[in-house]
Image (tube, grey):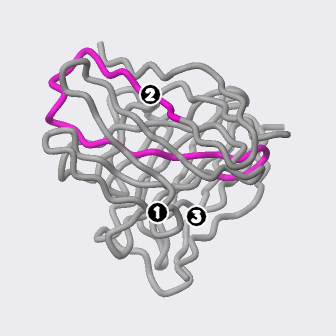
Amino acid sequence: QTVVTQEPSLTVSPGGTVTLTCALTTGAVTSAYFPNWFQQKVGQAPRAVIYGATNKHSWTPARFSGSLLGGKAALTLSGVQPEDEAEYHCLLYYGNAWVFGGGTKLTVL
Amino acid sequence: QVQLVQSGAEVRKPGASVKVSCKASGYTFNRYVFHWVRQAPGQGLEWMGIINPSDGTAVPAQKFRGRVRMTRDTSTTTLYMELISLTSEDTAIYYCAREGAGTYIYDYWGQGTLVTVST
């Protein structure tokens, strides 16, 4: 069974930098898995922030960036703001299906 | 502007079925495909399947095969997801999400529909 793993939780100080990762238990994540990242605040629907591993949507803040790092998909937030506190979900295309990671709860403290 | 507006909350008894709708507007309907995603209370997101509105082709996730039916009405630009044989484990928020056809780019999401399965 394909499993996509993320850090369950991370904490960052305002103004700091944090990197969230998305790994596949079966091997390295590449662009062929079309990584998408979503931000979900409490009580809200998910909002897309990154697609194709590195591309931002028109509404994605400049401080968000996506990459492929050490066999994983990564989402880096630089100059974190209090409003970035949220759950972040990665999504990979695998075997003609889509698989979500378990999500990372990001706390800004 | 793009809008995906879902139907309201539902309560069902175990063994029943539920049908959730997702009304799309603000763009050319057939140029995008749609996914259904659910989120159980306090849990992560779970992909349920995909439907192509241009021809109605639907592919459910393996876990939901035989239990989910995804359809669309092009005249009203509305997508539907019906889940049958409900159990308490189907209690969740159900979302529709748009993807540019063949692009692997998710962009807009519906606001979600809470389905509660309880005796």
Above/below status of B119 relative to A74: above
Numbered badge on residue B66: 1
Above/below status of A5 relative to A67: below
Q: Residues within 10 Å of mark 2 (few under 14, many from 20)?
A: many
Residue B44: % across, % down: 67, 52
Residue A98 vs residue B17, the one in the foreground:
B17
Q: Which residue is mark 2?
A: B21
Quadrant location, the C terminus of chain B: top right
Q: Nearer the viewer, mark 2 or mark 3?
A: 2
Distance in Å between CA atoms under marks 3 and 1: 34 Å
Q: Residues within 10 Å of mark 1 (few under 14, many from 20)?
A: few
Q: Callout 1: residue from which chain?
A: B
At horizontal 20% and vertical 20% (from top left) the residue drawn is B27
Quarter of the view holding residue A57: top left
* Badges 1 and 2, same chain: yes
The disc labelled 2 sits on which kind of residue?
A: Ser
Q: Is residue A34 left or right of residue B13?
A: left
Numbered badge on residue B56: none
| Residue contact between numbered discs 3 and 1, judged by CB atoms under 8 Å | no
Quarter of the view holding residue B93: top right
Kindly state the secondary structure of the residue where label 1 is placed: loop
Distance in Å between CA atoms under marks 1 and 2: 19 Å
The disc labelled 1 sits on which kind of residue?
A: Gly
Q: Earlier in the sequence, mark 1 or mark 2?
A: 2
Instruction: Look at the image and give the residue range highlighted in magenta.
Output: B19-44
Numbered badge on residue A21: 3
The disc labelled 3 sits on which kind of residue?
A: Thr
Q: Callout 2: residue from which chain?
A: B
Q: Callout 3: residue from which chain?
A: A
Q: Nearer the viewer, mark 3 or mark 1?
A: 1
Q: Is residue B117 left or right of residue A33?
A: right
